[in-house]
Image (cartoon, coloured by chain):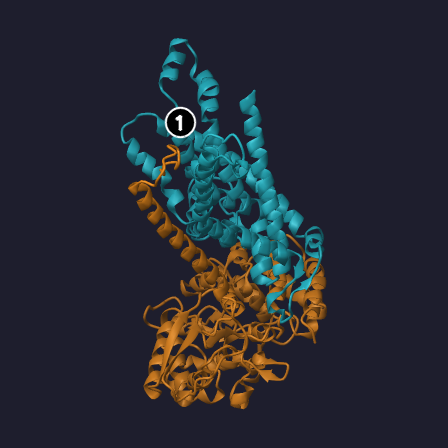
Chain colours: A cyan, B orange
Amino acid sequence: MTAPLEGKAAVGAVTSARPQPPKRPDSGRDHRLGRQYSLIARDRRFGYLLATPTVLVLLAITAYPLIYNVWNSLHHDVINSGLPPTYAGVANYRKIFTDHQFLPALAHTAGFTVVSVTVETVVGLALALALNRKFPGRGFVRAAVFIPWAVPTVVSAQLWKSMFDPQSGWVNYVLTALHLPLAHTTWLAQTWTAWAAILAADAWRNTPFMAIVLLAGLQVIPTDIYEAAKIDGASTWRTFWRLTLPLLRPALMVALIFRTLSSFLIFDVVYAMTSGGPGTSTSVLSYLNWQAFLVYDDYGYGGAISVALVVIALMIAAAYVRVFRSEQVL
Amino acid sequence: MRKLPGNGGRAGPSPRMIVARRRRAAVTAGALVTTAALAAAGCGSSGSGAAGKQVPASAKQTIVFATQGLGAEGTATAAAVKAFEKANPNIKVNILTLSPTSDVAYQQLTQRFTAGSSTPDVITSDVIWPTTFARPGWLANLKKFHPNTGAFFPGQMATGEYKGGIYAIPWFINAEGLYYRTDLVKTPPTTAAQLFRDAIAAMKKDPKLKEGLAFEGNTYEGAVTAFQSMGGQLSLSNLNNIDTPGNVGVLTMMFDAIHKARIAPTAVSTWEESQVQSAWLSGQTPFALNWPYIFALSQGSNPAYPAVKNKTGWVPFPNPVGSPQASLGGDDLVMNAKSTHQAAAWKFIQYLTSDQAQIARAIAAGDPPSVKSAYTAKLYAAAPYFRQEQAVFAVATPRPVTPVYTQISSQLQTMISSVLSGQASPSSALKAAAPTVKQLQATAGP
């Protein structure tokens, strides 16, 4: 989280880091001061100049696509129609609410996000707490735990898909061998079991991320306060709630924002495992967006869905920052 | 880490300040150059328009051929390119490999066309794409080269015709039919009811069988070809209302196969061709719906599949609501409208569709020739199963030739998936999809 701040400081240092002059540079007629301020002004210009390439790159890769997308969303533009784009007003946005696909997909996405982030946070925190203790072979176990996160999502989704295959996958094989229920389930062919499979694949890959970030947070907590708590006779449970969790809050916020947003934008697991099926019962917003752009070649409607996604994602991020800030004040 | 200048208020610039100033000038220049370069890069890609100046066929040149194909198909393509280059020493052909997944290859090509690239010059196109690519003007009209249209199977030739132009030349034909195990099924079924009975009987007789019928039902293009090969009515006029009694009948049969007769596993709703292929080759099913390449694999000896070798038969799928039909697949060759090497590209297309190249590919990769005259004694001698495949190609039925096919297909895939998974009844699924399909087809224009 510090990287963007550093960048900002480097640009702003020219103006904010020095002592404020008594008057505006151009109103100062004093010879000695005038020279000093012209140097400051030149320095400032130089600073802007240095920042220009970076700003241009940032504009080219963030602002331009965003604006282009907003433009798209206000036009009828099916790229293989052979017709030039025409202005559409808010028709594409209206379609979001009328096409019988967006709102169900929004509900699927929101539900998935809540469940997956909750599961991954709880399990990730447990993992982080365990890995923060000293035990023989800790380095090896830590590395092993983090391996799933290094596997590309599409690859892991494909692996999970084959593991859930009712004839050749080991999931049903193990269930059968242990005489457990659901041994004859075709996981990806029914709504709830398909969601369970998607959740398993997603949690397997992303829980380690949660654990990495939280472990880093745990490691900066000084150990002496735990010793003090111990001397004061605090129970382990109490120590966790009163010390660990509050001190972990910054790391937790970072991890939660990252996970919630990427969970909300989930695409590859769904794409590789179910293609939104059976029917449209695992269709999520990013999948719908992909379909609009690359299957329907409809850049207008695709643009509208993208803009909606960005707005919702920003709202989620803002809500998190607000919640964590207000708690900090109390 | 720069020092703040001017704090001392000294009279003249110190040597260090002069050095700093020079360095600053250099950095300024660098920043300006970077800015200019970025601006130039931003503007550079917007050039587009009609094809540039054409290079004559006799000139020394390189053309790019975009194609799918792994394994035997890839090797066969490389061999064909080598033979072409030998016959035409002035033309070099570079191969651009597209994704083996049809839907992904489509997106790769769409993105190149949208960007206005003049390469690839020649492109392998699924039979369902040419009109989609022709409508926005991405493909060259091949009529100017006076192709011999009578040489090809008419159903596939039609896939490249759009608004009086010819935008595609068939490369190899494909059609989806029913594989049956000759050791378990004495005579191939001619009705759907008989197919069900045979499958159940076979499963009783041979406990090694895991299912009675395998087909691909995942939410992708294959679900549509399976539906059509089983009798689904998808002609252009049907798109105005796909909710026909015939389509209800075919979907009901697909549903019954999974959920009532239970001859097909519930997993078929997640299967693609490759899963059907392994179910067939491993000998766990007496019936499987698939493309002709399975015939070559089943009879091949490297690797050998003893469960099916010399026990493989192939017929059109018995249509429960009419006469049998087989979804037409296969690949066409199309030419980029922006290519500046069109004469050489046409030479290459002519070579790939010559009898000699077609027979070589059929023998090496099992791709059935698109050229009728390639079905000769020479072909049958090397691969006798091509004689049997004729019966399926004879009833090959194209999917609707419309520029909005991919969109319509996406609707059909969802519809079929919801029926196979038991989420919707055949009639309600068709009722739900029909208006959208009609609406999409209406946007295709006359």
User: Is the residue B381 above or below the residue B322 in the image?
Assistant: below
Q: Say which residue label 1 marks.
A: A218
Residue B425 picture location, percent across and down = 67, 56
Toward the top, the furthest residue is A232
Q: Tag 1, which chain? A: A
Label 1 crowding class (10 Å Cα cut-off): few <14, some 14-19, many 20+?
Answer: many
Residue at 36% across, 67% down: B305
The quarter of the displayed image where residue B379 is located:
bottom left
User: Is the residue B385 above or below the residue B27 in the image?
Assistant: below
Q: Quadrant of the C terminus of chain A?
A: top right
Question: Relative to the observer, which residue lies in front, B339 or B76?
Answer: B339
Label 1 sits on a secondary structure element that is: helix
**Type of the residue with mark 1:** Leu
Question: Relative to the observer, which residue lies in front, B13 or A168?
Answer: B13
Residue A77 picture location, percent across and down = 64, 63
Residue B238 picture location, percent across and down = 69, 72
Residue B118 in view here: yes
Q: Quadrant of the N terminus of chain A?
A: top left
